[in-house]
Image (cartoon, helix red, strand yellow):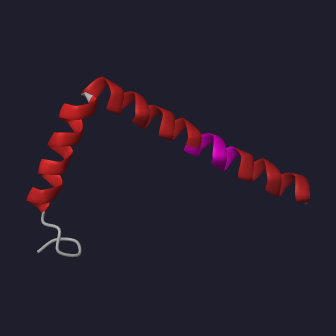
């Protein structure tokens, strides 16, 4: 059983297709950009909370 009817094999096949379409370097760059965006967002939220107090 999987997540809402999606089995692990479905997710693995989907991941394989995504890697074939976009390439591993492009996906790694997108992951790095997403991590940087999340880190910057968290920092901005902390800075905003500190300025309110």
Task: Identify whether 22 is placed above or below 16.
Answer: above
Residue 50 locus on image (x, y percent): 84, 53
Residue at (72, 53) in percent of width and height = 45
Q: Left or right: where does residue 28 sit relative to residue 44? A: left
Q: Left or right: where does residue 8 sit relative to residue 39? A: left
The residue positioned farthest toward the front in the image shown: 21
Residue at (73, 46) in percent of width and height = 44
Q: Left or right: where does residue 34 sit relative to residue 4? A: right
Residue 35 locus on image (x, y percent): 49, 40
Residue at (8, 57) in percent of width and height = 9
Residue 6 locus on image (x, y percent): 17, 68
Task: Identify whether 3 is placed above or below 37.
Answer: below
Residue at (28, 31) in percent of width and height = 22
- Split into 4 quadrants, where in the image is the N terminus? bottom left
| Camera-side residue of 21 and 33 | 21
Q: Which residues are magenta?
A: 38-43
Q: Left or right: where does residue 10 sit relative to residue 27? A: left
Residue 2 locus on image (x, y percent): 16, 71
Quadrant position of residue 10 = bottom left
- Split into 4 quadrants, where in the image is the C terminus? bottom right
| Camera-side residue of 37 and 43 | 37
Quadrant position of residue 18 = top left
Whether the magenta-drawn stretch holds residue 47 is answered as no
Task: Identify whether 49 is placed above or below 7.
Answer: above
């Amino acid at each position: 059983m999987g997540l809402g009817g999606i089995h692990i094999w479905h997710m693995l096949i989907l991941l394989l297709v995504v890697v074939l379409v976009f390439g591993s370097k492009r996906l790694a760059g997108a992951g790095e950009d997403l991590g940087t965006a999340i880190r910057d967002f968290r920092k901005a939220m902390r800075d905003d909370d500190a300025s309110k107090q």
